[in-house]
Image: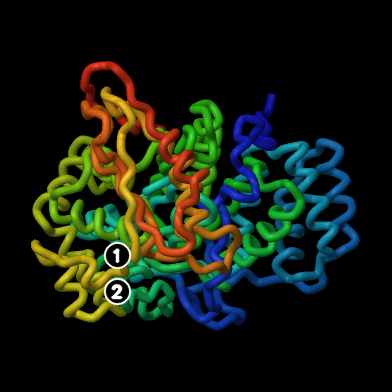
Amino acid sequence: MTRRHGSALRNPALSSSNRESIRPDRRRPSNVIGQPRGEVRVHKSPVDISSVFSVRRLHPQAAMSSIPELIKKKRDGGELSDGDIKTFVEAVTRGSIQGCQTGAMLMAIQQRGMDSRETSTLTREMMLSGQVMSWPPEWAGLLVDKHSTGGVGDKVSLVLAPALAACGCKVPMISGRGLAHTGGTLDKLESIPGFAVYQSAERVRAILSQVGCCIVGQTETLVPADRVLYAVRDVTATVDSLPLIAGSIISKKGAESLTALVLDVKFGRAALYKDLDGARELARLLVKAGNDLGVRTAAVLSRMDGVIGRSVGASLEVVESLETLKGAGPPDLMELVVTLGGLLLATAGLAADRREGELRISRAVTSGDALLKFRAMMEAQGVSGETAGELCSPDADYFKILRKARHQMELTVDRDGVLSDVDGLVLGQVLHQLGAGRSQAGQAVNHSVGAQLLLPLGRKVTKGTPWLRVHYEEPAPGPEQIRRLHDALVVGSDVERPRPALVQEVLV
């Protein structure tokens, strides 16, 4: 029996307030990471890096009368052929389908699901709905990227991208913005004065040639079908459809013409998926969809209950990332960087196995090579040499450059014991309310708002010991928010113990 992937019944957190990893960035301009629209040669394969930037040739005379039949076919539980899916995606991209028809098709997919062939075809057609990036032939086998389903304090990309570049990779990382309690990589980088997340296609090529990595925003010409479909999913309660999630995520990565991709699929209190089984189902689907596009794809299932590292908030996370690149990062952040990077090098064939890959990534960070790449990336993306140099210096005065909140408040432990747990979801939600996050696309965030865990989990403490420093401006934390933050900390009576590993499984 063919397996179908319908809506994810085990992921109630995929609501309108919690989906940074699958929402396109609606602030991006149309004239970056792509060339002007036009009829140019079409890619035959997403990994044909010798081709030019391409755009799918659309057929204006496609029979629109077939759309109702396609909706009916899927509504009644039928399988859509490759041609059916191509017709639907082209109609969406061209704008010749009615909005109600798009919504009806997405609801039919959400209710009836798609088998793996349908999902792979949908992903491919979405990828080919716009321009597909291409690279010089000598970069063959070097193009890699990662994707995370999002979490609290997830600053992995800021360390991993330059570490991969230091290992000889080319990393055209297309990232997103935060929504609700999840932080966005672009927001964090924009807290650095001068950092430009929007770059032209020619400039991206130049940065990759000179530096080896760049972190930029999605564009109007990259996977335009996804922008249309996501906007409809947002208002038709079809965000949690597994085939549609896979199509959204993997189509954009396929359009980067990658050699290899690694996915960090998170589960737990502060993740999209609360349980391991739901995250595993999504990870398997994403891995297959990526491999079907010709991108060597692997996934890591990692726990997201608390906070990654000890800082949350744009400016504070940039500081922690820089400290990590200087060899003083928290162990859990380094665990994710090394695991994801090592797996990616091995998947791309750039390391003999995961162990060798992990050693190379770790060495790139501890040697300072990754820090040099991060500095070069900052300068290549608009940061002045003086600012980049100051941030990367051993004794950097970070808040001489980065914005610091006008007020800080420390919370203390209310009894003796051991710091056992911190609810990352609560922390992220409160900081979002204080201005660190956004409730809808396009809203500004306050880069200075955030929080720092002053002690690592597993540490024995006495009553009155400060454990959290909140950085805020206006509004100030209210009594209810302070109560929630106090309740987010669990103080146990056990003996000191190390924090458990975040990585639970690896899927290849």
Q: Quadrant of the N terminus?
A: top right
Which is more toward the observer, 391 or 77? Answer: 391
- Occupied quadrant, residue 143: bottom left
Residue at image mark 2: 207
Q: Is residue 196 left or right of residue 245?
A: left
Color encoding of the figure: rainbow
User: Would you call the spot at circle 1 few (<14 residues within 10 Å), some (14-19), or many (20 or more)?
Assistant: many
Residue 472, position as x, y percentages in the image: 39, 59
Q: CA distance from mark 1 to mark 2?
A: 7 Å
> Height in image: 227 above or below 221?
above
Q: Is residue 159 left or right of residue 179?
A: left
Which is more toward the observer, 178 or 104? Answer: 178
Residue at image mark 1: 213
**Residue under the image location 34 percent in, 33 percent down:** 502
Residue 121, position as x, y percentages in the image: 63, 49
Res 48 seen here:
no
User: Considering the numbered disc 2 on the image, is that residue within a helix, a strand or a loop?
Assistant: helix
Q: Is residue 16 left or right of residue 149?
A: right
Going from N to C along the chain, the mark reached first, 1 or 2, is: 2
User: Considering the numbered disc 1 on the image, is that residue within a helix, a strand or a loop?
Assistant: strand
**Residue under the image location 51 percent in, 81 percent down:** 31
**Which amino acid type corresponds to the residue marked 1 in the rendered image?**
Cys
**Which amino acid type corresponds to the residue marked 2 in the rendered image?**
Ile
Which is more toward the observer, 190 or 211? Answer: 190
**Residue under the image location 44 percent in, 60 percent down:** 175
- Occupied quadrant, residue 101: bottom right
**Residue under the image location 22 percent in, 43 percent down:** 330
Q: Are marks 1 and 2 in contact (CB under 8 Å)?
A: yes
> Height in image: 108 above or below 157?
above
